[in-house]
Amino acid sequence: MYDQATTARLPAYTRNKLVTLARIKGKTKSDIIKEAIEVYYEREENDLDSFTVGEPFFGNYGSGESDRATTYKDRIKQKLSEKRP
C-alpha cells in the first residue's frame, strides 16, 4: 500500500506542540499525527453503537405495507395453510 500525503493547516501554537512532542518522543511529526488519529478513531469507534451507525438508514427501505407489525400472525397462518395439501 502506498502512503499518501495529506495537508492540514494548524495554528502556530498547535504546530509548536506537535514539533515539541515529536522532539521529546524522538518521532517524526507524521508518526505523532498518525498515532493521534488512531487513538481518536478508536475512542470515537467505541462511542458508536449500532443504533447510531444505522440511524441514517432507518425508514429509508420498507415494504410499503404499514400494517405488517399488526398482521404478521394472519400472514403466517395463511402461508401455513397454503402449504397444506
Image (cartoon, rainbow, N blue to C red):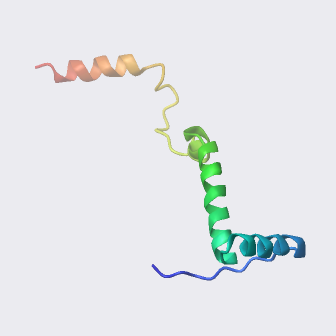
Q: Which quadrant holds residue 83?
A: top left
Query: In the image, 3: left or right of 20?
Result: left
Closer-to-camera residue (73/23): 23
Is residue 54 positioned above or below 40 on the image?
Answer: above
Give me the residue at 40% from left, 21% from top.
Answer: 72
Is residue 45 positioned above or below 33 on the image?
Answer: above
Query: In the image, 3: left or right of 28?
Result: left
Give me the residue at 22% from left, 18% from top.
Answer: 81
Q: Which quadrant holds residue 12?
A: bottom right
From the top left corner, tell me how far across and down residue 71 is, in percent: 43, 20
From the top left corner, tell me how far across and down residue 39 is, in percent: 63, 57
Counting labels gives 0
Closer-to-camera residue (56/66): 56
In the picture as drawn, the residue positioned furthest to the left comes out as 85
Closer-to-camera residue (3/82): 3
Quadrant of the frame with the C terminus: top left
From the top left corner, tell me how far across and down residue 24 is, in percent: 74, 71
Closer-to-camera residue (73/17): 17
Give me the residue at 84% from left, 70% from top.
Answer: 14
From the top left corner, tell me how far across and down residue 13 is, in percent: 89, 71
Give me the residue at 48% from left, 19% from top.
Answer: 70
Quadrant of the frame with the N terminus: bottom left
Query: In the image, 19: left or right of 66?
Result: right
